[in-house]
Amino acid sequence: MFTDIVDWYTQRAALLFVVLAASAVTMETVRRRFAVEPVEVEKGATRTTLASGVAFLAAKSIVSKLAVTSLALFVYDHLRVCTLDLSDPLVWIAVFVVRDVVYYWMHRAEHRISLLWASHMIHHSPRTIGFTTALRVPWMEAVYKPWFGLWLPLIGFNPVAAIALDVLAATMGQMCHTDSCRRIPVLEHVFVTPSTHRVHHGSNPEYIDKNFGAVFILWDKLFGTFEPEVAPVRYGIGSKRIDTPAEVLVGGYPALFAELRTLPTWNARVHRAVAAPV
């Protein structure tokens, strides 16, 4: 029974994500349009987000098909240390949990390393939050993030099944990008909720670099980066702006590279590139 469910979901995971994401965006648009107090939406934000999403999908398709998927299959076929039993629900749960803690540290690095923040800041650039915010994903992430998932085929988790886990996590993340749901303290003991993720998108001093978890908020509580939503959240990336399709395609790299060129040595440039953003 469990194997049948897994097979059904694996074959339809991508389609289900598209349907759920489109439905969520549509419902949110309708809600905001007919709200008693209409929510102000940034001018041109949808066009900018669309440009980001299309570029991400294009990059992901190219990188995944030409490089990462082929390499993952090679690792699984020739280098795996064991073969995990995908008919065992505990295997899926364990891998999903480990995957989430790996994501936590990768996400935290994106905020603390300038070279990665120059890409990730694109996702944080909207000055409102909604289901569409989740779709403003930098195309650069499709280039560097998949390589950090090669541990899955190495431990014997089938790469095709890993795609289904990615889609599940993405779907859950999509649902956390909303301002229509208040705090849910009971869930916040374990899971990322819309409230805790709003904090992550906040530019308030007390909210910066907080709540990095994707599915489980436990890692933030364990590693000291948890912050509950108390003060109203101010979204965006402070005085920096990424407002147009052209800007969303380059992120913070023009400014970062311009700064690196002013440094006298390559050693200083490397140190600045891996140092925390300013």
Image: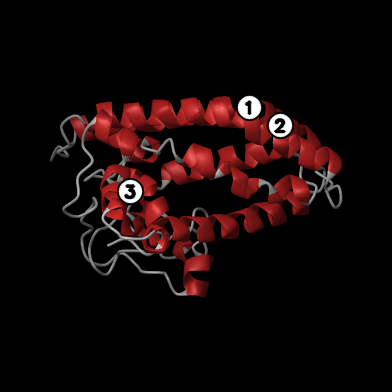
Q: Position of residue 65 (x, y in %)?
A: 63, 26
Q: Name the residue at 71% across, 56% down.
A: 94
Cα–Cα gap, marks 1 and 3: 27 Å
Residue 164: image location, x then y, percent: 64, 37
First in sequence, mark 3 or 2: give its number.
2
The count of marks equals 3
Is any part of residue 216 visible from this angle?
no
Tell me which label, 1 or 3, sits earlier in the chain. 1
- Where is residue 23, by image quadrant? top left
Placement of the N terminus among the 4 image quadrants: top right
Q: Nearer the viewer, mark 1 or mark 3?
A: 1
Q: CA distance from mark 3 to mark 2?
A: 30 Å
Identify the amino acid type marked 2: Ser
Front residue (pair 108, 257)? 257
**Residue 54 image position (x, y, % from top left):** 40, 25
Q: Residue at x 64, y 32 (%)?
A: 67
The residue pinned by badge 2 equals 70
| Label at residue 66 | 1
In the rendered structure, which amino acid carries the disc numbered 1?
A: Leu
Q: Is residue 259 above or below residue 14?
A: below
Q: Which residue in the rendered view is the most extreme toward the front?
A: 264
